Amino acid sequence: MIEKLNDIKLRFEEVGQLLSQPAVVSDLKKFAQLSKEYRDLEKVVKKFDEYTAVINDLLHAREVLENEKDPELRRAAVRNLGLINSTDSGKALQTIYGKETDRDVRKEVLNAYFIQNNASGLVAIARNEKDPELKKDAVSKLALMHDKAATDYLMEILQK
């Protein structure tokens, strides 16, 4: 699929160059045809560029988290993952939380899940968290969410 989108992007650039050629500009029918194709391709290319930027941000954040020792930079990378709000970033946050030993970075993962409105991620953490403070933080965030998974978990806690 990415290959197909790259082909579309190449065609978009090619059509853009054709539209600036004098022979095309003087042929109104050809110019109109290429202009329409350009507008149609532009929508797809714009979304593809946005997708590519998100993937690059995700990869960069993962790289920082894997290689960086400075906790502040690690927390910033987690915040960025929270802002990305994709399935991939949610999975990355889950992996980070499981491996992370720094409590502040783990708290930042909770914040990132909250920013994403990812109740299922917070519920998974709350169910397994042994640290009472982190569990309390996760449950507090769930209480602010208007999500079925959050409500179900809170009701589960109340019934214990």
Image (cartoon, rainbow, N blue to C red):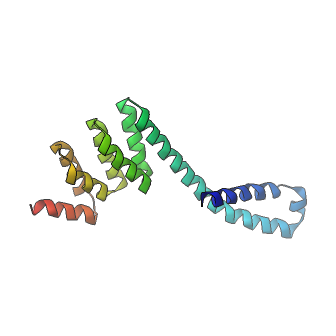
Residue, x 38% and y 42% (percent of image)? 78
Residue 144 visible to an observer of this rendering: no
| Residue 83 percent across, percent down from the top left | 42, 49
Residue, x 44% and y 42% (percent of image)? 62
Q: Is residue 89 above or below residue 35?
A: above
Residue 130 appears in which quarter of the rendering? top left
Q: How many marks?
A: 0
Looking at this view, is 46 or 4 the one in front?
4
Residue, x 66% and y 56% (percent of image)? 6
Residue 120 appears in which quarter of the rendering? bottom left
| Residue 69 percent across, percent down from the top left | 38, 29
Q: Residue furthest top?
A: 70
Residue 110 visible to an observer of this rendering: yes
Is residue 99 toward the left or the right of residue 36 in the image? left
| Residue 150 percent across, percent down from the top left | 24, 61
Q: Residue furthest left?
A: 160
Which quadrant, please, contains the N terminus? Answer: bottom right
Which quadrant, please, contains the C terminus? Answer: bottom left
Residue 80 appears in which quarter of the rendering? top left
Q: Is residue 96 above or below residue 9?
A: above
Is residue 121 toward the left or the right of residue 29 in the image? left
| Residue 19 percent across, percent down from the top left | 81, 58
Q: Is residue 136 above or below residue 5?
A: above
Looking at this view, is 72 or 19 the one in front?
72
